[in-house]
């Protein structure tokens, strides 16, 4: 019984970790990313910029095409882990939750009547993020609510100034080509 409880706590922790890592990746796309950057600029930053400009266009893309970048990245992480002899059930569960980030995001943009009943229920009880919660990220200047999997982390991360802290550490190192608000800071470096 105790073992099952330990596993359950780990699964919940991995679910939240997948939400956090997805949020950090999204923050990096929005903040450090440049559409002209090699590989990730085309694969992640450009579609992300398009999504900010025209959120409704997401539903015009086939769901599989929409999920391919994150699923490919997840598969790459698993392949590296396999050859590094670092495979574990926790990594597989984390990869499954992490790889689901984009589909969970897509569900927040889908018309409600097209959502499967189970997804509507999971959004209602807060296991998955719902549309009004995600929409807060789509309000200009898109600098809060970076996590897209659950509604649990965003309020805390925003309240604690987590994203502003990351900006203070990483923007002086890498610049922030898509963030004119940061380019006026005394600590900004290109
Ligand atoms: Zn964004
Ligand atoms: Zn969105």
Image (tube, rainbow, N blue to C red):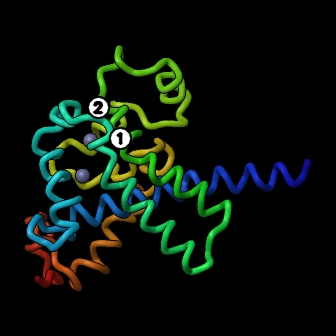
Residue 20 x/y as whole percent? 46, 58
Residue beneath label 2, please? 109
Question: Which label number is shown at residue 133?
Answer: none
Label 1 crowding class (10 Å Cα cut-off): few <14, some 14-19, many 20+? many
Q: Classify mark 2 as within 8 Å of ligand 2 or not, answering yes or no.
A: yes
Pick the residue in front: 17 or 180.
Answer: 17
Which residue is depicted at the point 62% across and 70% down? 87
- The residue located at (28%, 43%) in the rendering is 66
Q: In the rendered image, which quarter is residue 167 located in? A: bottom left
**Circle 2/circle 1 CB separation < 8 Å:** yes
Query: Does residue 70 appear to the left or right of 32 in the view shown?
Result: right
**How far apart are the alpha carbons under marks 2 and 1?**
7 Å
Label 1 beta carbon less than 8 Å to ligand 2:
yes
What residue sits 49% from the left and 74% below the top? 80
Q: Which of 143 and 13 is in front in this view?
A: 13
Circle 2 SS class: helix
* Circle number at residue 105: 1
Q: x%, y% of residue 102?
A: 36, 46
Residue 93 occupies quadrant: bottom right
Q: In which quarter of the image is the C terminus?
A: bottom left
Crowding at label 2, few (<14), some or many (≥20) Cα neighbours within 10 Å?
A: many
Quarter of the image for residue 75 reads bottom left
């Amino acid at each position: 019984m105790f073992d099952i409880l330990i596993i359950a706590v780990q699964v919940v922790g991995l679910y939240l970790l997948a939400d956090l890592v997805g949020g950090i990746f999204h923050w990096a796309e929005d903040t450090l990313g440049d559409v002209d950057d090699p590989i990730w600029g085309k694969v992640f930053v450009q579609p992300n910029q398009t999504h900010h400009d025209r959120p409704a266009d997401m539903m015009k893309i086939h769901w599989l095409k929409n999920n391919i970048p994150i699923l490919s990245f997840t598969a790459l992480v698993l392949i590296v882990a396999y050859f590094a002899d670092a495979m574990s059930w926790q990594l597989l569960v984390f990869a499954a939750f992490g790889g689901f980030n984009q589909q969970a995001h897509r569900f927040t943009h889908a018309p409600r009547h097209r959502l499967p009943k189970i997804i509507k229920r999971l959004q209602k009880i807060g296991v998955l993020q719902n549309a009004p919660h995600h929409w807060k990220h789509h309000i200009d200047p898109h600098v809060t609510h970076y996590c897209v999997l659950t509604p649990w982390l965003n309020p805390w991360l925003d309240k604690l100034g987590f994203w502003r802290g990351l900006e203070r550490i990483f923007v002086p190192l890498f610049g922030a080509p898509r963030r004119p608000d940061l380019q006026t800071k005394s600590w900004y470096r290109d």
